[in-house]
Every structure is written in C-alpha cells, then in structure tokens.
Image (cartoon, grey):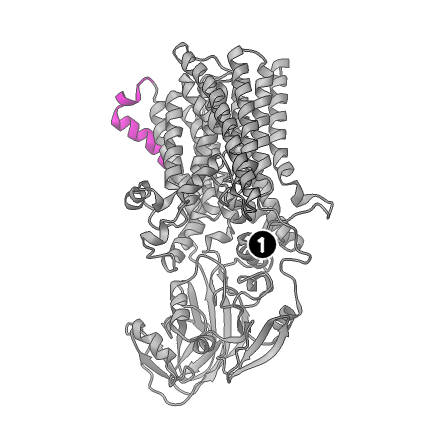
Amino acid sequence: MTHRRRSDTLVEVAILAVLLLLPPLFWWRLWTPDPADRMAIPAGDFSSQYYPLQSFAAQELAAGRLPGWDAYLNGGQPGLADIQTGFFYPLNLVPNLVLAALGWPFSLELMTAQIVLHFMLASLFTYLFVRQLALHAGARLPAARFAGCIAALSFTYSGYLTSFPVQQLTILETAVWLPLILFFLDRALGANRPWPFLAGAALALACAFLAGHPQTAMYVTYLTLAYGLFVTAQRAPGAEPARLPLTQYASRVAFYVLLPIFLAVALAAVQLWPTVQFIALSTRTGLDYDAVSTGFTLAEMTHLLYPGYFGSSAQDVGILTPILAAAALFFRPARRQVIFWLVLGVVALLLAFGGNTFPYSVAYLLAPGFSVIRNQERIIFLFSFAAAVLAGYGALTLLQPIARDMRRGFRQFGRGLGWALAAMVALTALFYAGYLQGLQQEIQVNLFEGVLRHHVLLLIVLSGAVVLFALRRAGRARGWRIGLALGLIWLNLFTVNWRFNQAEPLTDSAFPTTSLVAFLQAQPGTFRISSSGLLPGGASAGAVYRLEDITGNTPLRLDAFKKLEDGLGDWRRWQLLNVEFVLARRDLGGPGLEPVYQEDRVRVYRVADSLPRAWVVYRTDVAQDGQALAMLDAADFDPRASAVVPPDSQLPTLAGEGSGQAATVVEAWPGHLAVDLTASADALLVVSQPFYPGWQARIDGRRVPIERVDYTLQGVSIQPGAHRVELDYRQSPLPGVISLAALAACLAGFVLSRRRV
C-alpha cells in the first residue's frame, strides 16, 4: 500500500469513526452512567406499543416458539403477522436469539440502544451514498467526502428523524435503509459485475420491509423505483436518454430496478404474506378520504425557519442545509440530478400537508397505497432526505470550480444571503418590540418570546452562511470553509433537536410488578382480563405481564373483534371472551361483579358469570352477521345452551335441549390450547378465541375443521363420548420457503459473480 493510499484510508476511517460517534454524543443523556444526568425516552408509543410487541416476540423465542399468535392483546390476534413486532428484522432477530441463548430478558434499554444504532446507520449510509454521487459528478475525493458529511449530518439530525420516528421505532428502523438501497443501486449501474450490488440493494430493501412500518416502506419503494428509472436513463452508455431505444431502456429497468425490488419482496415474503392477510381482516380496510387525508397544517410551514414553534419540528432541516440545497443549482455537472432531487423534495413537502393542499388528492386517486395509509405528514421523510442530498451537491460549490456561465449567478446568490441577513436583523427589532409590548401588557402567552428564541439561532447560522460564501468568493481558507460549514450544521441541528424525545426517567420500571399485577398473575386457571389500559405500562402491558387481555394498544386489530366489542354490551362481551376480572377506576356496582382487589384508585372486579375458555353446547341458531350480534346480546339468549352460526356454516344443525358444560383446559400457551370434554350427544365445542385462518383442530389426534360461531369465535363439531381436542395456530410454510429460496439465490449469484473471469 502506497503512502497516499494509506493516508486516504486513514482519513476515511477517521470520518467514519466521527460519524459513528456523533449519535452516542447526540443521545448521551440516555446512556450516561451518572443517574443525576440520565434521561429516558418519554412515555408514549415507544414503551406502550412497541415494547410490549417486541417483548412478547422475545419471550416466545426464549420459550422455543415462534410468536405466531399473541394471546395477550385484543382477546388474541396474529403475532408474527403484526409487522410492527418486527420479529424477522435482522437487527431484532439476532439480539433476540442471543438473549434466548444466554437466558437474558428483553428490556427497554435494549430498545433504546436500537435508537442510537439506527442513527449511526442513517449517518453511515447517507455518507456513503452522497459521497458516491459527488464522485459521479466529477468531484475530487476530498470534496466528495465533504459532501457526504454535509448530507449525513443534515439527514440524521434533521427534525424528521429526531421527532416521531424515535417514538414510533419502526419508522426509524425502516427509513435508515433508503440511502443504502440507493447506494447499491447506483453502484450496480456502473459496475462490470453488477449482481453483488443488486443483491445488496435487494437485501437492504428487504430489511426496510421487515423493519415493521409499511407506510415508510412504501415511500422507500416509490423512491427506489423513481431513482432507478431516472438514473438508468442517465447512465445509458453511448446514448442520450431521449435517444435510448425503448426496448433497451425497458430491459435495463427490468434488470437494474425491478429485479432487486422483486427479490426484496421475495426475501421479505415470510413477513409480508401473513401481514397482508392480517391487514385484509383488520380495521385498516375501508378507510375513506377524510380518514386518511390528515397531514401538517399550512401554518406548520413556519417550522422550516422556526422549528417547534407550533409543536412538532419534523419539517426542520436547519438553516444552512436549504441554503446549500439552493446553491446546488449552480453545480452544473450534476444539473439533472439536482433537478430530480429538487422535484422530489417539493412534491414530498406538498404531500406532507395531506388534504390541506390539492396534490394529495392526485396521489390519493392515482398512486397505489396512498388511499389506504393515514398520517400523510410522514412523507416529510422524503423531503428531509432530498434536502440532505441537495445540500451535499451544494457543498461541492464551496470547494469545486463553478462553471463560467454560472459564476455571476453564484456571486449574486452569495450577495442575496447578505440581504437576507439584513432583513432578518431588521425583523429582529419587530419581534423584540412585540415581546416588550407583551411584557407591558402582562400577556401570559407571549408569542414573540417563542419566535425570538428560534430567531436568534437563525441569525447566528445565517451570519455564518454569509461568511462561508464570502470566503468562497474570495477563494481562500478552504479548510476553514469545510470546518465552518460542518460546524454550522452541527450547531444548528444539535441545538434544536437534541432535547426532543428525552424526559426524566421513571423512578420505577416502566412495567413494575405491582401488587395488583401480582394478584392477577397468581389467579388459577385460563382466563382473560379487561384492563381498560389500567395495567402499569398501558393498554398492551398484558403482553409483558403474560396476562391475557381484551385490551390492546396497536393499530392492527381484527375488524370482526372490534365489531363484536361495539355490538355487544359489556356484560355479554365479558362472558363470551372469558373475562374473569375487570379493572376500573369507578364503582361498577351491579349484580355479578364482585370487588376483589384495589390498588390506589384501580379496582379489580370478578365477573361471577364468566364463561370458561371452552364449553360444549347442544343447540345452534342460524343468523346472518347483521342479526347475530343482536341475537347474542339479547337478555334471553343463553350462550351456554346455544351457539349462533352463519348460514354458510358447514356445522351440522343441533337441536338439543338444556345447558352445556365447560371443557377442561389441560394445556394452554400462545397458539395452543388442549381441552378434555365429554359430550352426551352430538354437540358443538365453542372456543373463546378469535376465528382466524391458520388455526387447526384435532380431536383425539384426527384433523377436523374449525368453523366460525358466535360471530367471531371458534367452533368444532363434537360426537358423543369423551375426547381431547387440541387447537394449534400454524402459519403456512410457503412464505418462509420463498424467503429462503430468494436468500439462496442472492448468495449463489454473489458467489458465481465473484468467480467470473
């Protein structure tokens, strides 16, 4: 290795080391050993939604089982199929396997470490991608590194990644793979042996699919497709894009763009297949325009200059970043690329306002996927990334020569920054006057005080930008230009965003085993509770405490279960769902509810007339779904004596008299139930579990069908005599086979490509 190559390697290693060390610095209060300084992720979706899902998956893996069926939320629902569990996501699966092997428990601290890790990946991947773009644009290696660093800082510490993706961890885990996907795709288009890079793009995109946020994965896929279509035409050898034969262009797109997307879908089939099935049967189907068109308000556009003034700061990309993004227009070697990223950023920004701007209506009508996802503000992700890439290109204007026909405009741009600074200084006087007037009038909420707090930082960064471009015009202090630009972005974004998503830690664990929890865990038998979200840790805490609950905090829940909840009164719902204990903060009173425990203001009531987990009936009543709920809720209906079946049921009609009897539960764990029973005549076993594809039943070892009864419960036909009935939830192995085959194809292609002469 020559001295120059060794020096280049050392510089590259130093840059990567700094980029990887900045996230622990940004989040230092989450891991500092000093208890007085330590902070934690505040209560919210991070702890109340994502932790229970991932904790359940880790506990099942430790028990030697796949988390196929989550018995602890919403009366039971698919566990693996809930993509937010992220079970197959490699950065979840590998730690969980290690924990299971060592016998260590899953913890919130491990999830917190995932935040820091993914910030490191976002920084690393963005640096690699933009550095590569700069080299393609003809930049020298030092300038390309500078562009990569600018983009990495701008994207990683922007208002987007540091805001709601931290609470909604799957958004963060999905978003960070975008720059790596584009990096591999870009490398493939310029490589003599593209297969390793296409396989890399497919694996990175599969990671985005497996991470657990379909909406963000959809944005990643759209941008991958758009960028692939654009850059495939731009890199066509020996032809201008407009003159490239259509058949040749189509074949290149199929190989370089569609193939890695297809492979990624196949790699993630083990997760996507059951998830699509779950979504089709969930409450997410049938959403209308009003339900999905929400987004940022137009007033929140001010966050581009004054982040956090109206609450969130997801639109914030700093002050120098958009300035450099605008300067990218003067970098002629990448003019087409700059226009691509500029159009992307503008479109994403407009769509982030949802129905508050008309462009979303076009996407709603024409773009697949936009009509079934909510919270359109999340597409600000693409705006943030586009701004970072543009800032990388703009950074090249600080070091690279400017084309002759661009120099005049570039000088005017620099002078324009000076005029903008002067205008902002003048505006400071207006804000300060308003602030003083508010003090004199003793206004409790002085709006100008909040503006001034952000405005001062804007003035500091804008002043630095003016100096930066003045140094560029003078052609001096190259090292100072690099240091000043990086320092301004670091100062701006760290100062604004580092305190978000950090709060004083709880004195106790987020999921303490209180006396109330211990009381419920000590109760014998197989039963459910109705916690109403009153367990320590929130509505999904049952998954942590291993208490089967009919409550849950998760966006994906079975539509039939929700309709059962909405269509029945409390008492009948508790009966049918095997609820033995109800938690409440008020006096429920009434016959049949016995108060048995109280902790602080939370009272525990025992349901005296609760049905068991499984029971035998000798009569069936036929009713359409619209009538079934009314029949079940009727005061004269006895669910112990009769079951309601739909007209298309394959169950034999039963007309026996008298009440049935309970079946004895002999084995029970998530996804498995075994009961012993004795039937005196032809009967129906009603099992208090949601009817869902994948459940299988065996009577004395013989496979029998499961039918839907009592609107959404499970029913098995029973012949007279003593029997053991076993029910197991089993997912189809086909998606796993597809994923393994795709992985084998990627690895085989990689090995074969390395052996090519």
Confirm whether residue 481 shows in the render: yes
User: Residue 564's image quarter?
Assistant: bottom left
Instruction: Identify which amino acid the numbered label 1 is placed on.
Output: Ala
- Mark 1 = which residue? 43
Closest to the observer: 693 or 365? 365
Q: Which residue is situated farthest in the top direction here?
A: 404
Confirm whether residue 181 shows in the render: no
Q: Position of residue 411 (x, y in %)?
A: 45, 14
Q: Is residue 335 left or right of residue 166?
A: left
Question: Majority secondary structure of the magenta segment?
Answer: helix
User: Residue 185's image quarter?
Assistant: top left
Task: Give the magenta range.
Answer: 238-258
Quarter that holds the N terminus: top right
Secondary structure beneath label 1: loop
Q: Which residue is situated farthest in the bottom direction here?
A: 658
616 relative to 209, above or below? below
Q: Residue at x 57, y 18 (%)?
A: 481
42 relative to 350, above or below? below
